[in-house]
Amino acid sequence: MKIQYLGTAAAEGIPAIFCQCETCKKSRKAGGKNIRTRSQALIDDTILIDLPADTYMHSLVNNIDLSKIHTCIITHDHGDHLYPLEIANRRNGFAHLDDGDTLDIYVTTPGYNKLALVKEKFDDNSQHRVQLHKIEQFESFVAQGYEINAFKAYHSELCEPVFYAIKKDEKSILYAHDTGIFLEETWDALKKYGTKFDLVSLDCTFSVQPWTEGEHMTLKSNAIVRDRLFEMGLADENTVFVANHFTHNGMATHDEIKKVADEMGFITSYDGMVIEV
Ligand SMILES: [Zn+2]
Ligand SMILES: [Zn+2]
Ligand SMILES: [Zn+2]
């Protein structure tokens, strides 16, 4: 299974769009992996995770033909993960598609409602081009042969946030953004899920900061999650661990995060990174 990281930043990007902080200045100057766009990933060129405003730019930079993507799963409706207006560009007159080329979007209620408002403006000939599937926290479903489990995230409750386990052909990836250290009910659900992960991608919004509380994580909290996954048999020495989804408020550039993450056994994500497990 392949995961391609298209965007690896939190809401404001790095350097943040209107920011003059030291981390943003250093990141801007260093360039390369220190530049991060809003959160998005692609599994096996097939399952798109999230739909931020940077989606169009991601498709250009990575040469991805979005007309050929038919499944999109949304974690929650924060702006760095869902830009609802973009789907309007799939309707008649804005996209020329073969009949039957549907984009299925799986999303919890708050994001569903925002997307449904945009879809209302589609004419009858375009309605089939975006199919919205309202999902619940802890629901599982199958899309294009992938078994997808939506776990409840510890994140802004009003969003009904989820993070995903994606499984196919004996391979399994856990993509856990945005969330703090998991809720007990989520650990219980992961225990029931019971499959060892080949790759675990963890929210690391505040990177090198020393705390572990709250609705996002740090490298320190990532280590706590990793320990528990090992204890539960959901990870082993072959599991690849990735720290991802960073804010400039973590006060570290990619290069500075990587130094610490390498020592702790985490891969530091960057825009365009591809890992196959
Ligand atoms: Zn986010
Ligand atoms: Zn900044
Ligand atoms: Zn969020």
Image (tube, rainbow, N blue to C red):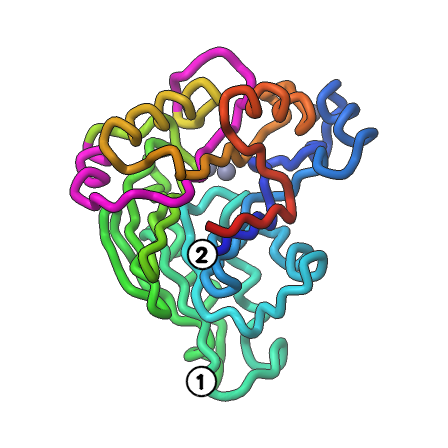
Q: Earlier in the sequence, mark 1 or mark 2?
A: 2
Is 192 left or right of 81, judged from the image as shown? left
- Which residue is located at x 30 percent, y 29 percent? 230
Q: Secondary structure at mark 1?
A: loop
Q: Quadrant of residue 179?
A: top left
Q: Secondary structure at mark 2?
A: loop
Residue furthest to the bottom in view is 99
Queried whether the magenta region covers residue 211, the answer comes back as yes
- Which residue is located at x 44 percent, y 72 percent? 130
In the rendered image, residue 72, in percent from the top left (x then y), is placed at 44, 61
Residue furthest to the front in view is 237
What are the residue bounds of the magenta stretch? 185-214
In the rendered image, residue 183, in percent from the top left (x then y), is placed at 26, 29
Q: Residues within 10 Å of mark 2 (few under 14, many from 20)?
A: some
Residue 53 versus residue 206 in the image, above or below:
below
Q: Is residue 98 visible?
A: yes
Queried whether the magenta region covers residue 176, the answer comes back as no
Is 230 left or right of 127, judged from the image as shown? left
In the rendered image, residue 181, in percent from the top left (x then y), is placed at 35, 26
Q: Nearer the viewer, residue 64 or 265?
A: 265
- Quadrant in which the N terminus appears: bottom left
Is 5 left or right of 165, judged from the image as shown? right
Mark 1 or 2: in front is 2
The residue to which callout 2 is attached is: 1
What's the amino acid at mark 1?
A: Gly
The residue to which callout 1 is attached is: 100
Is 217 left or right of 136, judged from the image as shown? right
Q: Quadrant of residue 192?
A: top left
Q: Quadrant of residue 251?
A: top right
Q: Is residue 120 visible?
A: no
